[in-house]
Amino acid sequence: MSQWLYWPQFDRHEPAKQMAHYRPHLKTAKDARAVRTRSALRDAMLQLLALKPLDKITILDICQTAGVGYTTFFRHHATKESLLDDVAAGEIAHLIGLTVPIAVAEDVHAAGVALFNYVNEHRKLWSTLLTGGAEAAMRNEFLRLSREVAATRAHVYDWPPTDISTILVVSSTVELVSWWLQQKKPLSIEDVAVIYERIIIRPHIGGDRIPPARARRQPRSR
């Protein structure tokens, strides 16, 4: 775990027993009104994060910005950290949707440029997500979606195994983005995209299709 990762504390201005308000409805996720409310809460969190750090944001702030009642918040999230995780998952889903079509077209460098362009355009948000307690949620969602994509492209003789390649690529990508965001004089988007392409992606594509042990058993061509 990165040394800068921390879990924000509950707001001192909010009830200590706020978890007691959490009453998720069984049909919440499918209800049209609930979907609109969840979207409003995510948008409110994004707006507030652009103005102040997470530890200065209260659930009341979120509700007022979203235009929803205080108790309504707890039908969807137990804490503001839960909402932050929801925002993080949405950002990862958007990023995957943006870069995968480019990568599938085998233009890895262009996919890297698209990735870091997007992060740069939302730099404050991504810095907050990765240093404000949502790193695990982002990494897990990134891994989940990446595994879904990899499963559609896996080959029985892929080497190294698709799953470990996916884990290594996701972990390295998150670390590279985190490192880049922390630099006082960050590399250009083009330069960091080269690191992404050559060090993170290329070692996992275009390699041997057959595991070494199996390759040793195959007869040599004359």
Image (spheres, grey):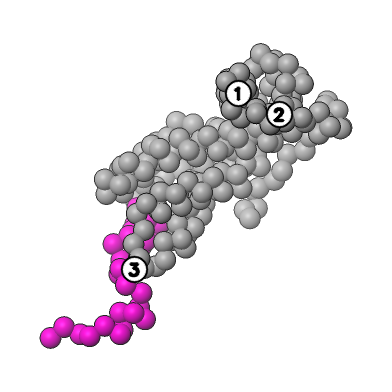
Query: Is the residue under label 2 in contact with that under label 1 (CB below 8 Å)?
Result: yes
Of mark 1 and mark 2, the one earlier in the sequence is 2
Pointer 2 residue: 25
Q: Locate residue 112: give its quadrant.
A: top left
Residue 144 at x, y percent in the picture: 51, 49
Per the rendered image, the range of residues in magenta is 197-222
Residue nearest the observer in this picture, 110 or 205: 205
Q: Secondary structure at mark 3?
A: loop
**Residue 22 screen position, x and y as percent:** 77, 31
The residue at the point 20 percent across, 85 percent down is: 220
What residue is drawn where x is 51% and y is 42%?
181
> Relative to 140, does residue 74 appear above or below in the rendering?
above
**Marks 3 and 2 close (CB-CB < 8 Å):** no
Q: Amino acid at mark 1?
A: Asp
Q: Which residue is mark 3?
A: 157
The secondary structure type at the circle numbered 2 is loop
Marked residue nearer the N-terminal end (3 or 2): 2
Total count of labels: 3
Mark 3 belongs to which amino acid? Tyr
How far apart are the alpha carbons under marks 3 and 1?
Answer: 44 Å
Corner quadrant of residue 217: bottom left
